[in-house]
Image (cartoon, grey):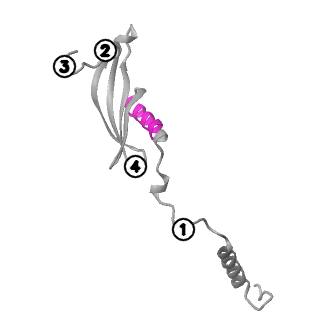
Amino acid sequence: MFGPCPGGHPEGEVAASSAQAHRSRIPRPRGHHRRDVTVADKRPGPMEVLRDARGQLAELTGMDAESVSSFERTEDGWSLEVEVLELARVPDTMSLMASYQVDLDPQGQLTGYRRVRRYERGRADPRPGGR
């Protein structure tokens, strides 16, 4: 067992009061407050969400995402439209493509997906008015 330190304080008290004195002398940037790190602080950025969403969709469907045609943050997390090669054909312009609506939670975890469109790679969307 340890005895009192010089100054008559038990060793634990000196260590605690010394640490408190040291903390009080450390200047903090304006507006900086101590707080616990929450899940919201660990939210992924847009590029990480895109990469992870493509990987998660590929794992679930067995098809690789070729591109992301739309991407937005929603109240529930993220919403993407991902273009996928469903059936390769020769020539490549005849390959079957599909657009998938992919929904993710705020942390970027896939919560649902559905195919919203299927088309041949070489075909453009029809224009309104038939032009």
Closer to us: 115 or 130: 130
Amino acid type at circle 1 is His
Residue at the spot x=70%, y=82% of the render? Answer: 12
Which mark sits nearer the N-terminus, 1 or 4?
1
> Which residue is under mark 1?
33
Q: Is residue 41 in the magenta section? A: no
Image marks 4 and 2: residues in contact by CB distance under 8 Å = no
Overall secondary structure of the magenta section: helix
Would you place residue 46 above or below residue 97 in this image? below
Residue at the spot x=39%, y=11% of the render? Answer: 92
Q: Which mark is residue 123?
A: 2
Is the C terminus in the top left, top right, bottom left or bottom right quadrant? Answer: top left
Q: How many marks?
A: 4
> Which residue is under mark 3?
129
10 Å neighbourhood of mark 3: few (<14), some, or many (≥20)? few
10 Å neighbourhood of mark 2: few (<14), some, or many (≥20)? few
Rounded to the nearest angstrom, the CA distance separating label 2 from label 3 is: 17 Å
Amino acid type at circle 4 is Pro
> Which residue is under mark 4?
106
Which mark sits nearer the N-terminus, 2 or 3?
2
10 Å neighbourhood of mark 1: few (<14), some, or many (≥20)? few
Q: What's drawn in magenta, residue-wise?
A: 49-61
